[in-house]
Amino acid sequence: MTTRSTRSPRRRTVVALAVVLVVLGAFVVRLIDIQVVNARENIASAMDYGLAGSQVLSGTRGSIVDAQGRPLATSVLDYDCQFTPENVRTISRMTASGDTVKVTWPKLSDQIAAITGQSGDQVRQIVSDALTADPHSQYAKLQNGLSTEQYRALMELGADFISCTPTPSRTYPNGAVGGNLIGFVGGDGEPLAGLEKTDDQCLAPTDGKLTYQRGKDGVIIPGTESETPAQDGGTLALTIDTDLQWYMNQLTKQAKQQTHAQYATATVVEVKTGKIKAAAEYPGVDPNDFTARGSYLNSRIFNDTFEPGSTFKGITASTLIDAGGQSPTSTATVPWKRSFPNGAQVNDATRHPTYDYTLAGVLMDSSNVGAATFSQRISPDIRYDYLKKFGIGSGSAVGFPGEAHGLVHPVQDWDNQMLYDTAYGQGLTTTIPELLGAYDGIINDGVKMPLRLVESCTKPDGTVVTPTLPKPTRVISEKTSAQMREILENVALQASYSKMIKIPGYRIGVKTGTGQISNNGHGYKSGVYYTTMIGFAPADDPQYLVAITLDEPTTVRSSSANAPYFQKAMTQVLKTYRVMPSTSKPKMLPKFG
């Protein structure tokens, strides 16, 4: 028989259980409401209260490599390290023998300072200042830009209140070698110059993102992480040969210093492909320290224009042969100074008797009067058309940042003097790439190859992308090209500087130019010139073009100043690419009729 006394405890138990179930049900309903029904709103609210966090995952900027795959620019990881000041304390550390020791903050701060290059007092002051400003401070910068070795040493200290964030930085293992071509990036990773800038689409990484939720103590809540991975940049392969570029860098420094020029350049092009194998200049820039005093941040090779002088006699002769019915042995009567019927006056650099010059002889002695006299045998319109066909005024296919274009005035703007000046490289301007492109067309069986610095871009997924280039263009006939090679080889053999440029065992062709320099729009500078020597080898089967330029050399003021540096440059090119010596003999052309 159940009594009232036994029913009462049971009733209380049932009631209590019912109350617990009701409360538990309310919690379940509320939990479902928070985590399911209104999850998005609650997460957003948590983010407003600082309970959600995110971190940028940095991709690595792609490398720039030379034609052999050797690095010219690479990215390395630096580390930005910081304290959680509120958690700074004495730590326990296991010794090598397995014992646990206590390391106090004063001692630990000295160990940290020894790694970061600071003093112990500086490290302690960082934490002290942060805690003075906020006793619960969660952040104080220790040091930015620490190396991987420094980062590892800090982590080995075992202090959980030190954390580090990896950040990519740029390094250039060859320093100033090719610096003006490669360019550089700023401290924020923004490309500022050179190929770093033009090919940023290939090199630039795509950052990722890590999002998470964290507790009040700052610890990430497990299972809340969501990651969008970063994508690294691609690898930019250049046509440059690092070893040859290094040699040319040293040579331009030597040339500039020995001739007391304002600057010097040396450029090498592979004739049959248009690939630039070296492009050096001095003064230059070390991309690792581009703010250093004396750095030249642009590229004079690509960004400067100049009056070419007598190198343009090669273009004039090519035009006369190709379209004017002339030959290397065509003749003209040439005094040292001539007044033309329209009033223009032209003179040669030195006095000489009136010669019956051949066209080849005009180039051998670099006669301005001879070039002007021969130029009358073809119309100005045809001469202008050939200048444009050779690419003068069109820049190059390289597309370098701020690349300059030469200036050729339309024929209708040629005055009486310019009509003749343009035959020997005055009254117009060009650039080093334009000049190299023109001579490539002259000597490469009449076909002008587009110049190029970039071989390819290899994307992170392995896709290889090659640059889109203009098609090679025929500028003169194959026969005209062969005749021009003979003329330019005879220049190398019979010019006054022939012994200075001789390379035993090899046949070479060459032409010089001594261009006047504008005096800021007020005529020309007096007594100083822009000198050029451009040449190729072997003359019977051209493989490489070399151009040496000097701005205002003063020890020797004519283009013969370039001769010893051209000889060294071409010799090095032939050695680098193991070009076989010539086995045939040149055809000698007469200077006079």
Image (spheres, rainbow, N blue to C red):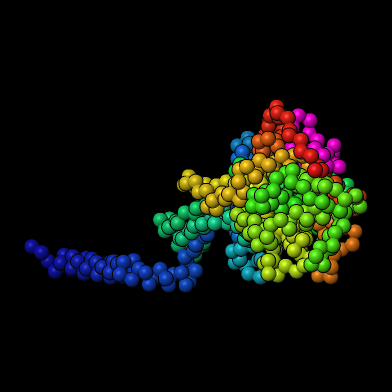
Q: Nearer the viewer, residue 97 or 123?
A: 123
Res 13 → quadrant: bottom left
Residue 411 lies in the magenta-colored region: no
User: Residue drawn 66% across and 47% down?
Assistant: 442
* Horizontal and vertical percent position of residue 570: 75, 39
User: Magenta segment range?
Assistant: 492-514
User: Residue drawn 47% across and 46% down?
Assistant: 463
* Horizontal and vertical percent position of residue 49: 48, 71
Q: Residue furthest top?
A: 583
Which image quadrant: the C terminus?
Answer: top right
Q: Is residue 101 visible?
A: no
* Horizontal and vertical percent position of residue 58: 54, 55
What is the number of callouts on the image? 0
* Horizontal and vertical percent position of residue 555: 91, 50
184 shown above or below 499: below
User: Residue drawn 90% across and 50% down?
Assistant: 352
591 horizontally vs 174: left or right: right
572 horizontally vs 36: left or right: right
User: Residue drawn 28% across and 69% down?
Assistant: 29
Q: Residue furthest left?
A: 1
Res 153 → quadrant: top right
Residue 507 lies in the magenta-colored region: yes
Q: Nearer the viewer, residue 217 or 252?
A: 252
Which image quadrant: the N terminus?
Answer: bottom left
Q: Nearer the viewer, residue 228 or 217?
A: 228
Q: Is residue 334 visible?
A: yes
Res 424 → quadrant: bottom right
